[in-house]
Structures are given as structure tokens and as C-alpha cells.
Image (cartoon, helix red, strand yellow):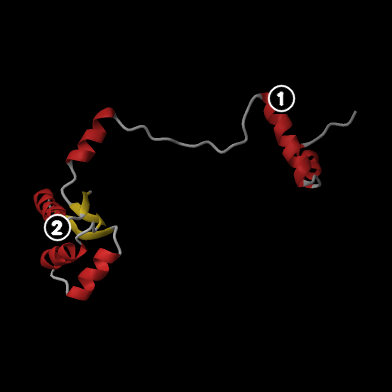
């Protein structure tokens, strides 16, 4: 019996159809107890890292989720907060959910959220 070389195996595989190759791979996986799926590397974070990441956040965004029933009052507050014109403030309110202010300190974000909520809007600070 003639010895089969790697080149012979490669040439044989090159002539297989996609369906035959799929069945061949499944057979090899079953026979050798392996998986042909690409390995996925997962980096495990240390337990203390999550708390550090939360503490490091110094900039916050104020997101107007819905203007509520008092839309005109919300538009007035948005104008006062952002310095936008009437048209721009109305467009911002109409396109909610939308950021009113971004990258601001926590205290300022909370103050703005309180103003908007006082006008009847629903707000998120992220």
C-alpha cells in the first residue's frame, strides 16, 4: 500500500464540494473531540476595576428623554440652559431623546436635570 502524503490530502480536499467539506469537518470534530470554531479571547477584569471605572467618571450628559405635557415650558428652559434660539431649542425638544448638555460636571448636570424636570420634562443624567 502506497503512503499518502500531506500534498495528496490537500489535493483531495481541494476537489471536495462545500457540502462535502462541511461534513468532513463535522466528522473530524466528532472523531477527535475538537471544535473548528475560532477561539474567543475574553479578558477578565479584576473585581475592583469596575468600582474604579465608576468613580472615575467626571463628565456627564443630560439627556432629554421626553418633553412631557408642558412642551413650551421645556423649550424655554432648554433655551435658557443652552443659549439656543427658539427654533433650535424647539428642534432639540422635538427630537427627544436628545442630549441637552454634554461633558459637564455632575453638579451642573444634576442642576440642569432638576430645571428640566421642574418644567415637566423627563431627563436622564448619564
- Give the residue displayed 25% in from the left and 34% down from the top: 49
Mark 1, Cα crowd under 10 Å, few <14 / some 14-19 / many 20+, is few
Foreground pick, 10 / 19 = 19
x and y, in percent, of residue 103 in the image: 18, 56
Q: Look at 18% across and 74% down and name the residue there.
A: 86
- Counting from the top left corner in percent of width and height, residue 56 is at 18, 42
Quarter location, residue 90: bottom left
Mark in the foreground, 1 or 2 = 2
Judge whether 22 appears above or below 3 on screen: below
Q: Specify whether 114 is left or right of 87.
A: left
- Secondary-structure class at tag 1: helix
- Which residue is labeled 1 in the image? 31
Q: How many marks?
A: 2
Residue 101 visible in this rendered orientation of the protein: yes
Name the disc covering residue 119, or none.
2
Q: Nearer the viewer, residue 17 or 70?
A: 70
The answer for how far apart the CA atoms under marks 1 and 2 are is 68 Å
Q: Indicate which disc, 1 or 2, sits on the residue closer to the N terminus.
A: 1
The image shows residue 92 at horizontal and vertical percentages of 25, 66
Residue at the outermost right position: 1
Amino acid at each position: 500500500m502506497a503512503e499518502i502524503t500531506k500534498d495528496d490530502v490537500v489535493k483531495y480536499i481541494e476537489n471536495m464540494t462545500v457540502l462535502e467539506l462541511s461534513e468532513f469537518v463535522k466528522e473530524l470534530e466528532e472523531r477527535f473531540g475538537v471544535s473548528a470554531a475560532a477561539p474567543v479571547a475574553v479578558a477578565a477584569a479584576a473585581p475592583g476595576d469596575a468600582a474604579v471605572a465608576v468613580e472615575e467618571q467626571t463628565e456627564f450628559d443630560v439627556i432629554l428623554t421626553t418633553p412631557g405635557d408642558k412642551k413650551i415650558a421645556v423649550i424655554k428652559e432648554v433655551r435658557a440652559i443652552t443659549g439656543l434660539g427658539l427654533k433650535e431649542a424647539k428642534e432639540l425638544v422635538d427630537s427627544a431623546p436628545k442630549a441637552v448638555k454634554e461633558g459637564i460636571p455632575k453638579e451642573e448636570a444634576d442642576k440642569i436635570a432638576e430645571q428640566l424636570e421642574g418644567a415637566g420634562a423627563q431627563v436622564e443624567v448619564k
